[in-house]
Amino acid sequence: MDFSSSAFWFALGSIILTNIVLSGDNAVVIALASRSLPPKQQKLAIFWGSAAAIIMRIVLTVAAVKLLTLPWLKIVGAMLLIYIGVQLLNEGDEDESHAAKASIWAAIQTILIADLVMSLDNVMAVAAAAQNGPPGSQVTLLILGLGISIPLIIFGSTLLLKVMERFPIIITLGAALLGYLAGEMFISDPVDAAWFADNVQHAGLIAGALGAVIVVGLGTYLQRRQARAAA
């Protein structure tokens, strides 16, 4: 493989840049899922969650074209993403005893599931960037480009954790983002995409907003019910 090829380095740079741009929502999930852990476990959850998510994304990218054509996959993914958003928001007012019991493996599992759902669209852009490389270099480019992105995602997640501690409203905004992504994903499934495109103007915006309202509304309701039960 010719590492001196300008096409190779251009494609590698494109993958890294694309992954940085598309990983903002993933950093939000990682920060949300890790915030209830003790500081030492937060770092471990962020590192292993990010690393495992990148490896999974490489596998997804290879099979991206076939995955995205499967009917009902995005609908199921959207419902799962709403569930994750509600659960993460519902953990917002945890006390110290609950935080101490929080499992690092549960956080990593949440990170992986959410990244799996949200990466269904993202991997298409990364796969397209890899296609610009020299023949036979696509897999190498994916592994290198996504691997280099790990510390960038970790940095973003760590920064978000600090911001969440200072501005709790970020937690609600992060959960709303997951709901918005779920709404967009729901109407882009092969089963219903054509109907929404033909019958609903600005369907993506409306569905995204509705998803955000559902996550924040349901999560806030469960928070308040939990607080009343504790009182």
Image: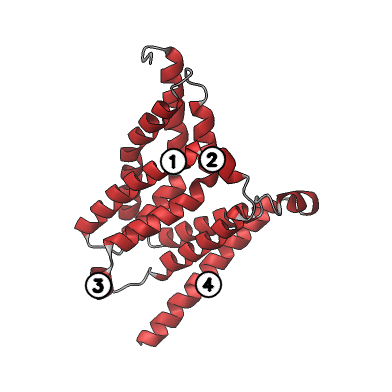
Which amino acid, mark 2? Ala
Question: Residue 176, percent across and down?
Answer: 51, 59
Q: Are marks 4 and 2 in contact (CB under 8 Å)?
A: no
At label 3, the amino acid type is Glu
The quadrant the N terminus occupies is top left
**Residue 168 percent across, percent down from the top left:** 38, 62
Is residue 10 something that shows in the picture? Answer: yes
The residue wearing badge 3 is: 96
> Residue 197: x percent and y percent?
75, 49
Q: Earlier in the sequence, mark 4 or mark 1?
A: 1
> Please, what secondary structure does the residue beneath circle 1 have?
helix
Q: Nearer the viewer, residue 192 or 20?
A: 192
Relative to 192, residue 6 above or below: above
Q: Residues within 10 Å of mark 4 (few under 14, many from 20)?
A: some
- Disc 4 secondary structure class: helix
* Number of marks: 4
Q: Nearer the viewer, mark 4 or mark 2?
A: 2
Among the two numbered marks 3 and 4 on one chain, the one whose residue lies closer to the N terminus: 3
Residue 218 got which mark? 4
Local crowd at mark 3 within 10 Å, few (<14), some, or many (≥20)? few
Q: Is residue 24 above or below residue 16?
A: below
Q: Nearer the viewer, residue 202 or 121?
A: 121
**Residue on which disc 2 sits:** 64
Nearest-to-viewer mark from 1 and 3: 1
Question: Could you tell me how far apart the alpha carbons at marks 4 and 1 are, in whole angstroms?
Answer: 33 Å
Mark 2 vs 3, N-terminal side: 2
Disc number at residue 59? Answer: 1
Residue at 51% from the left image edge and 22% from the top image edge: 132
Q: Residue furthest right?
A: 199
Q: Amino acid at mark 4?
A: Leu
Q: Residue at x 30, y 64 (%)?
A: 36
Q: Amino acid at mark 1?
A: Val
